[in-house]
Amino acid sequence: MAEYKLLLPSMGEGVMEATIISWMFSEGDTVKEDDSVVEIATDKVDSDVPTPVSGKIIKILKQKDDVAKIGEAIAILEVGGEGEAVAEQSQQPKTAEEVKTDIPQLSEADVKELEKPVVASAGQEFSGDLYLSPLVKNIAQQENISESELKSIKGSGIEGRITKEDILAYVSNRGIVTSEAKQTVSAPQAAAPAAPQPAAPVSAPIAVGAGDEVIQMDRVRKIIADAMVNSKRTSPHVTSFIESDVTNVVKWRTKHKDAFEKREGEKLTYMPIFVKAIVKAIQDFPMINVSVDGDKIIKKKNINIGMATALPDGNLIVPVIKNADQLSLSGLAKAINDLAYRARNKKLRPEDTQGATYTISNVGGFGNLMGTPIIPQPQVAILAVGAIVKKPAVLETKDGDVIAIRHLMFMSHSYDHRVVDGSLGGMFLKHVHDYLQNWDLDTEI
């Protein structure tokens, strides 16, 4: 019998490691080809790892909560065949066409960035004695944290490893300590008493009373919390509001939803219509479909719409509809239903949550009239749609104004004021409003 190494597969662009959440089989169990054997978690998404071969698990190399790098062996299987050598997880050699496909296509901005000379910084070379994940190492380099400083950080990860939360907490406290140290050194040199300096903001300790329950944030909630704080710190948020008459949209969906479900086996929700309107507005105002890199604006070629999705455990994930401008209404409905289903059943792939250029959040699904959404970085805008409510409204007719019952909906558009001014943010929202309010009842599905 031969032995086979099960390696942690590539999890998409930018993902270098993953945490083992749980094994679905134990040592000694027999597995079949394509069986999901282990659940893993990355900063992007949770997913299962299938085995490409059939065999018996004879050794689990990475236990629950262990961190494995991409390409690292996580288990050894006993498989049919002669020989004692441990087989690697590659099957047939890739063809030239497959290799070409695997090569990442760089944008012009990426090429320019790679062409920049590398400038060495003091304290940025770390010895092999100190294990740092790529994310932690990147933060350390950006904040110019030396190796001696890193060694002073008490890690909360496996075997005392420094986690993202550890280094961000250190950076936050480092600023306070540095400020206090400077004041202490400069005080004796002052010729006259210095003016009182404002105290650095420090969070007041939270009192825990009798009967209070302390709940530790799970991994996903920590990631969401960090992302939201980082977005508010990065982008000056401005939010514009508009109320739209979506009566035509409601009538059109009511007319087509039963036939569509019978024909396609898919539910027809309002979301494909909202996404279609957003795509048209982006085509009208492409400077909404951008990202910011320092003092550069990167204008995105593709229109990839993120769709904020609530999970059964109360957390949030944003799967992405890739190339939404190339999909029909029917195609959008299928893509949206598929992503929503897989998100709620933990079946998303890492690439399903990457590459969004604009995001929509349906706060109306919870009965809310409107909200002020936070921009998912590195995007520069996000739209929230509220609940559709019947209201009396004034209609202009050739015989004068009349009051009628209409289906009305609020929309709120948050945008990054570094690159999106009120005129652009407001006009974009008005165009989404116009597309929905003037929805053609003869639109084909």
Image (tube, grey):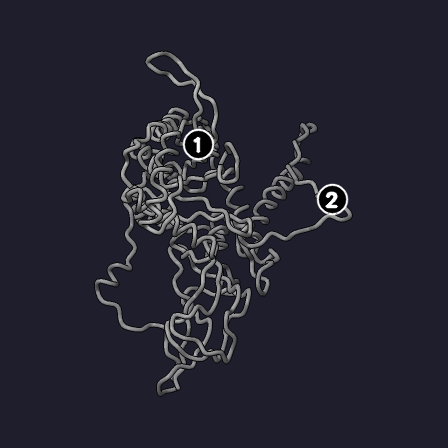
Q: In the drawing, does residue 397 fall left or right of residue 43?
A: left
- Disc nearer the start of the sequence (1/2): 2
* Residue 349 falls left or right of residue 366: left
Please identify the quadrant where the N terminus is shown: bottom left
Residue 234 horizontal/vertical position (percent): 48, 38
Residue 378 in sight: yes
Q: Residue at x 38, y 36 (%)?
A: 295
> Which residue is label 2 attached to?
207
Tag 2: amino acid: Ala
Q: Which mark is residue 325?
A: none
Which residue is at the far top?
400
Q: Nearer the viewer, residue 286 or 167?
A: 286
Spatial CA distance of label 1 from label 2 is 37 Å
Q: Position of residue 147 (x, y in %)?
A: 53, 56
Q: x, y percentage for residue 217? A: 60, 52
Residue ID at (46%, 55%) = 45
| Relative to 143, residue 402 above or below | above
- CB contact under 8 Å: marks 1 and 2: no
Q: Quadrant of residue 424?
A: top left
Note whether residue 290 is visible: no
* Number of callouts: 2
* SS label for mark 1: strand
Amino acid under label 1?
His
Residue 434 percent location from the top left of the image: 35, 27
Q: Between 160 and 72, which is closer to the camera in this rendering?
A: 72
- Say which residue label 1 marks: 413
